[in-house]
Amino acid sequence: MVMDNLGGALKDVFKRLTGSVFVSEKLIDEIVREIQRALLAADVDVKLVFELTNKIKERALDEKPKPGVTPKENVTKIVYEELVNFFGQEKKGIEIMKKKGKPFKIMMVGLFGAGKTTTIGKLSKYYSNRGNKIAMVGMDVHRPAAHTQLKQIADSLKMDCYVDAKEKDPVKIWKKYEKDLSKYDVLIFDTAGRDALSKDLVKEIKSVSKVVKPDETLLVLSADIGQAAYKQAEMFHESCGVTGIVVSKLDGTAKGGGSLSACAATGAPIKFIGVGEKMDDLEAFNPEGFVGRLLGLGDLEALLEKAKGVVDEKDAKKLSKKVLSGDFNFIDMYEQLSAMKKMGPLSKVMEMIPGVGSMKLPKDVLDVQQDKLDNWKFILDSCTKEELEDPEKISRARIDRIAKGSGRKVSEIRDLLKQYRQSKKIMKMMKGGSPEKMMKKFGNMKGPKFKF
Ligand code: GDP
């Protein structure tokens, strides 16, 4: 997998977060420190690391979770969002605009060995797979093997390639093929490379750019240069009008975090990433998906949906206020049952109460099966107003009456009363004590004793 080391280290951070009981300042500090360690090991610039982790810490301490989102989920979401920002926010790639007789032109630039020629092949395949007619055009007039290499890649993909090994002037190459090239949807131009970005190289790229007038100029950078990518990306961006970056060889380096974050920091968008030597190993860069995969957060989408506030905040507040007042009867429970589908089970409502959400509450008390709930509704419908307001008044004789009226078994009514008493006990504890005290009490809590 791409960026295994960074991914592995960040996954450990999330394991620690999930395994913890409370989200405390201490935990946030620890998490932030581990994220710093992971990013520094991936060759991310120290300044960028600290900027990022300061933001994470600030938000984790200040931002209250939305209803239905636990503090732990909230911190996960914050770390995820900040990492996405860190790697460039929006989904990139390039949208090809097809105009008859006017091909979409992509000019590739980069230093020797960056992976430029390979990327030209990968991009050709990428756009060909999407229904475009492609031609590769060789404009590297200096390196003798450049034409052969480009031609070989084009042949392996069974695609058209225009090169002229004898011609030393890129402008003349363009003039020679311009008419023929107008029948393609996308043209991908190879340009000369150098060992470093020299004045000569800038001049040459500019002169090719002037005649070709590319729609996109993509810089190919090798991921193994780590944070040095910042300087290279910035220089190419400023001198050659680069419109986007392809970070190649992300599969083979521990420095991928450094190169990606450095590119993102220049403001030049990362459009694609190269993740292997094969022609299929190219991905349009999508920071959200990339970070999600890096962190191994399969459930992320669901979490983010929830964080958007799918849960009705007002209803949740109303109920949690009632719950906290300790004034909890069958009617409240009935209301809770009716609201269940909209709000999620009682455990979810509990999670919305500050200080309670992160606790591991006994699951069987809080999460009741849906079919059980449906039956309980029948039972509650057969209760008198008096019984609903004070379920303790439900005697053995009343249980028999309710069983008959609702068509449910006596044992089910007892079950409901048991649920009510356990819930009420929890409410009472929450009203009075600190979450820690409550946890202790849970340790001692046994099933309630029945009076009947
Ligand atoms: P150029 O000098 O910029 O044209 O670089 P090349 O395209 O010739 O690539 C240099 C080397 O890097 C070749 O051996 C490629 O196979 C390899 N390469 C290019 N992209 C990737 C990539 O995404 N992953 C891996 N593992 N190797 C790559």
Image (cartoon, helix red, strand yellow):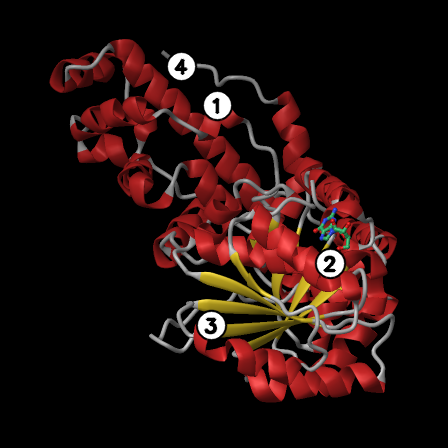
Tell me what residue is drawn at x 61 percent, y 38 percent.
Answer: 359
Question: Disc 4 or disc 2, which is closer to the eye?
Answer: 2
Q: Quadrant of the C terminus?
A: top left
Residue at label 3? 181
Q: Earlier in the sequence, mark 3 or mark 1?
A: 3
Q: Earlier in the sequence, mark 2 or mark 3?
A: 2
> Of helix, strand and loop, which one carries label 2?
loop
Q: Nearer the viewer, residue 3 or 248?
A: 248
Residue at label 2? 115
Residues under labels 3 and 4: Cα distance?
Answer: 90 Å
Q: Earlier in the sequence, mark 1 or mark 2?
A: 2
Left or right: residue 391 versus residue 150 is: left
Question: Disc 2 or disc 3, which is closer to the eye?
Answer: 3
The answer to whether the residues at label 2 and label 3 have Cβ atoms under 8 Å apart is no
Amino acid tagged 2:
Gly
Q: Quadrant of residue 231?
A: bottom right
